[in-house]
Image (cartoon, helix red, strand yellow):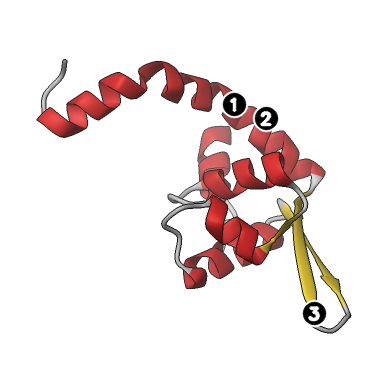
Amino acid sequence: MKRISYSCGLDAAMDVVGGKWKALILWALDTYSPCRFGQLKRLVEGVSEKMLIQQLREMESDGLVHREVYHQVPPRVEYTLTPLGESLNKALEPLSEWGYENMEHIVAVRITGRQA
């Protein structure tokens, strides 16, 4: 069931992009769009087929992703970001930059269990 009330903008944004895979799917679609399902599965390392399908459906429902079905044999489906998805991806860029800048520290803390 989808939420209809939020306490702040960050709450709403995290509800839409929350989880391990959605931000990575956004990145892949921004970088390699249009993308077919198999290509997305390869780009988002570790995601199961079932989870990728679920996440893409949710993102399509939220208006972040457009799914284009080409009626041919064999059938072909391509995914692209909508303008809303593009704007969300752009909003995540500073978070990505923070991750790059702090990646060594994050890895060290995760390995040793204590701050460097």
Residue name at image x 59 percent, y 26 percent = 93
Return the disc, 3 or 1, that comes first in the chain's sequence: 3
Q: Residue beneath label 2, please?
A: 90
Label 3 CA crowd tier, 10 Å (few <14, some 14–19, many 20+): few
Whole-percent x, y for residue 108 in the image: 20, 24
Whole-percent x, y for residue 64 in the image: 71, 51
Kind of residue sitting beneath label 3: Pro
Whole-percent x, y for residue 91 in the image: 63, 29
- Give 84 or 43, whichever is nearer the viewer: 43
Q: Residue beneath label 3, please?
A: 75
How far is the residue under mark 3 from the one under mark 2? 32 Å
Q: Is residue 43 left or right of residue 68?
A: left
Q: In this view, does 103 lie to the left or right of 75?
A: left
Question: Can you say which quadrant of the picture contains the C terminus?
Answer: top left
How far is the residue under mark 1 from the one under mark 2? 5 Å
- Examine the rendering and report whether any part of residue 28 can be seen: yes
Q: Is residue 112 above or below residue 65?
A: above
Q: Do the residues labelled 1 and 2 touch (CB within 8 Å)?
A: yes
Q: What element carries label 2?
A: helix
How far is the residue under mark 3 from the one under mark 1? 34 Å
Kind of residue sitting beneath label 2: Lys
Q: Which mark is residue 109?
A: none
Mark 3 or mark 1, which is nearer to you? 3
Q: Residue beneath label 1, please?
A: 93
- Give 32 or 90, whichever is nearer the viewer: 32
Q: Is residue 51 above or below residue 116?
A: below
Kind of residue sitting beneath label 1: Glu
Q: In this view, does 86 lie above or below 36?
A: above
Return the disc, 3 or 2, that comes first in the chain's sequence: 3
Residue name at image x 81 percent, y 42 percent = 83
